[in-house]
Image: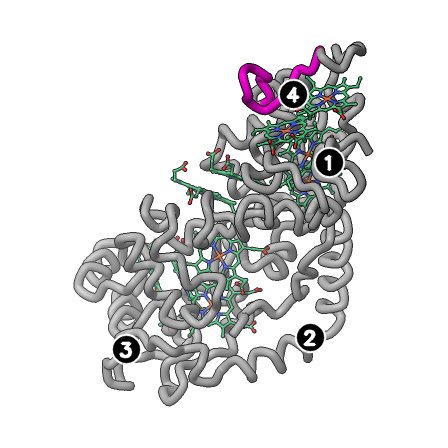
Amino acid sequence: MRLQPFAGKPAASPGLFRALIAAIAMFAFMAAPSFAQKRTESLQGPSVASRTPDYDAPASEFAGPEACKDCHKNEFIQYEKTGHAKLSFPGKDYIHGCETCHGPGKAHSDSVQAAHGDDADIAKAMAAHPIFAFKGKAEENASRCLSCHVSSKQQSLFDHSEHAGHGISCNQCHSAHLVDEVKDAAKGDMTHPQGYFFQLPQIADENRWRHNSMLKRAEPALCYDCHQTIQAQFAQPEHHRVPEGLMKCSDCHNPHGSENVAALNKSVSETCVNCHVEKRGPFVFEHPAVKVEGCVTCHNPHGSSNRMLLVRREGRQLCLQCHTGFHGQLGAPHGKLGFQTSGECIRCHVTVHGSSLDPNFLR
Ligand code: HEC
Ligand code: HEC
Ligand code: HEC
Ligand code: HEC
Ligand code: HEC
Ligand code: HEC
Ligand code: HEC
Ligand code: HEC
Ligand code: HEC
Ligand code: HEC
């Protein structure tokens, strides 16, 4: 079951359209709260919580969300706006609200309450009655979320992802109650130079968060925090328009991991032809460089200082990597033709991605 209540992903629409569709869907969503409500109810079935966390404590150890409200007002306000606020564990009505993630909290509430604001006593109470706060190991944190989210295909591979392998858990990217992270709405997010020149209108972080999978920061800023080399690639003159907000890292990658190289949504070339459909073929005459080696043999997917995201400045050099033309190897350069074949090969071989008309990709 998919847990995403918004914008069903149009499988094959270029970034521009995607962004537009997402924006439209977002506003449609904002205008129709009953839609969210309905979805939430339908998701409360056992299929969502197919791996119930270890919450066997008796009902008397749970305090209920109202108990947390007075002391943790900010978290409460933010959390109430999310789909999570309407959840409880199937069959255990007494576990809902804050305690679905933080576990039984009555001892914490009562003991801190009894401290009457005395710092030393609070510290003692916290030590005597700790409450789960996602400060443990990454797997432990993630398992708290995965106890419900295991049924979503999107997250099911998380445990085997590079992210999990490097100790990164759900709460590094998502926030159940965005409090500290809320930024100055007027400023938007301008952490990358291209953003100054061209950018979609920014939504204030507090609202963005609620309609953006509860991400702590919007992509790509979220990813740039850790992936600075990738940020540098996107700062090159030629790039997919990720910094401008027209495309997202997650259009190509699944941050929760996947079975493909580099956690891509699909195999490398399939990821690309999802948008660049005209490159998919099939062609009568396929170019093995495209079909077998794949798009990234010639293109850098993130950014490049060369035109068309090419990995080489000289198109000619790009082709001569394979078409050396010596002794029976792939034939070129072809001086035997008796005409000038200097300059760019694509001057003549215009359909280098494959052709249904000409075996030599001349048209
Ligand atoms: C009487 C006030 C009070 C109530 C009621 C209360 N808390 Fe707390 N809570 C505190 C204080 C004080 C702290 C310590 C804050 C700090 O260290 O800055 C705290 C800390 C926490 C932490 C962080 C623990 C950590 O190790 O960092 C979590 C999580 C938490 N509370 C959740 C809850 C939940 C869930 C409830 C309701 C079941 C709840 N609290 C009820 C006062 C309260
Ligand atoms: C009690 C089960 C449960 C737990 C525990 C849980 N979730 Fe969820 N989560 C759900 C359900 C059900 C939905 C769908 C709610 C809705 O329709 O709005 C959801 C929705 C989401 C969404 C999507 C919201 C959106 O706007 O697209 C994200 C992101 C998410 N959860 C992350 C987390 C993270 C991170 C954790 C752990 C810190 C977590 N969840 C813990 C059940 C749970
Ligand atoms: C969907 C899971 C989830 C639910 C439900 C949830 N929280 Fe949290 N909470 C987290 C995570 C994850 C963290 C760790 C902080 C982070 O990484 O953002 C956290 C951290 C906290 C903290 C510690 C903040 C700090 O600065 O250390 C408090 C206090 C807290 N939550 C209170 C609450 C209260 C009160 C509720 C209910 C109104 C609640 N939480 C509901 C997931 C949840
Ligand atoms: C490295 C950052 C990162 C981590 C770690 C991460 N997520 Fe996500 N998650 C994202 C991004 C980015 C999206 C939005 C994807 C999109 O917009 O299509 C997302 C979307 C989601 C969604 C909504 C879409 C859906 O699949 O229904 C849920 C639910 C979710 N994540 C849950 C989790 C859970 C549970 C974990 C931990 C097991 C987790 N995430 C770990 C970045 C992360
Ligand atoms: C908290 C730090 C952190 C954040 C945030 C983060 N990453 Fe990562 N990511 C890592 C680390 C560490 C690795 C593993 C080492 C490496 O490849 O750099 C990694 C690896 C990856 C990989 C390679 C995966 C593989 O299987 O080879 C991809 C792709 C990736 N991240 C994408 C993203 C995207 C997209 C986002 C934003 C939605 C994101 N990351 C956010 C830290 C992070
Ligand atoms: C147009 C699709 C596309 C977009 C958008 C995209 N990537 Fe990638 N990314 C790829 C492909 C394809 C590869 C694999 C390259 C290879 O195998 O040589 C890759 C590789 C990676 C890797 C692992 C290899 C490396 O260079 O370290 C990381 C990490 C990564 N991407 C992060 C990101 C982040 C972060 C973003 C957003 C800021 C992003 N990607 C946006 C297609 C994309
Ligand atoms: C989400 C849709 C999407 C995906 C996936 C995607 N692209 Fe693109 N690509 C675009 C759009 C839109 C443009 C042109 C608009 C722009 O950004 O200037 C573009 C432009 C290009 C260009 C031309 C650059 C130029 O200077 O005109 C190349 C080459 C390219 N993409 C290759 C790839 C490769 C290789 C992959 C796979 C790793 C890929 N694309 C994946 C949407 C996508
Ligand atoms: C053999 C090297 C090579 C491979 C492999 C390759 N391309 Fe290209 N691609 C080029 C060259 C060279 C150009 C520049 C063509 C021009 O300037 O007319 C180009 C241009 C493009 C363009 C922009 C111009 C246009 O025709 O729309 C896109 C988009 C593109 N490639 C996508 C892809 C995708 C998607 C794949 C994988 C399915 C791929 N390429 C594989 C060499 C390659
Ligand atoms: C990764 C290696 C590689 C790259 C790079 C590459 N090719 Fe090829 N190309 C091949 C292979 C392999 C064949 C099939 C040769 C065969 O069947 O004998 C081929 C076939 C061709 C053919 C068809 C003629 C034939 O013998 O089937 C033409 C024309 C061609 N390539 C032009 C180009 C041009 C122009 C470029 C640069 C834009 C280029 N190639 C880049 C590997 C490559
Ligand atoms: C002026 C136009 C032109 C340029 C420039 C050109 N070619 Fe060709 N190429 C042709 C023509 C015409 C044919 C078909 C010859 C035939 O029918 O025998 C051909 C055939 C080929 C073939 C298949 C036949 C063979 O020789 O094995 C390959 C491979 C090839 N070219 C690669 C290249 C590469 C690589 C470059 C750049 C270094 C290049 N070509 C530049 C016109 C050109």
Nearer to us of marks 4 and 2 is 4
In the rendered structure, the answer to whether residue 130 lies left or right of residue 310 reads left
Q: Secondary structure at mark 3?
A: loop
Q: Amino acid at mark 2?
A: Pro
Query: Badge 3: how crowded within 10 Å, few (<14), some, or many (20+)?
Result: some
Q: Main secondary structure of the magenta part?
A: loop
Q: Is residue 334 magenta?
A: yes
Read off the magenta span. 323-335
* Disc 3 target residue: 55
Between 14 and 270, the one nearer to me in the picture:
270
Are the residues tagged 4 and 1 within 8 Å (C-beta)? no
Q: Secondary structure at mark 2?
A: helix
Which numbered tag is attached to residue 359? 1
* Disc 4 target residue: 305
Query: What's the residue at 62%, 82% (across, down)?
Result: 38
CA distance for labels 4 and 3: 54 Å
Q: Please tell me which of labels 4 and 3 falls first in the chain.
A: 3
Q: Is residue 169 above or below residue 226?
A: below
Which numbered tag is attached to residue 33? 2
Look at the image and name its color scheme: one colour
Ligand 9 lies under 8 Å from the Cβ of mark 1: yes
Residue 234 appears in view: no
Query: Badge 4: how crowded within 10 Å, few (<14), some, or many (20+)?
Result: some
Q: Please tell me which of labels 3 and 1 falls first in the chain.
A: 3
Between 99 and 280, the one nearer to me in the picture:
280
Q: Amino acid at mark 1?
A: Pro
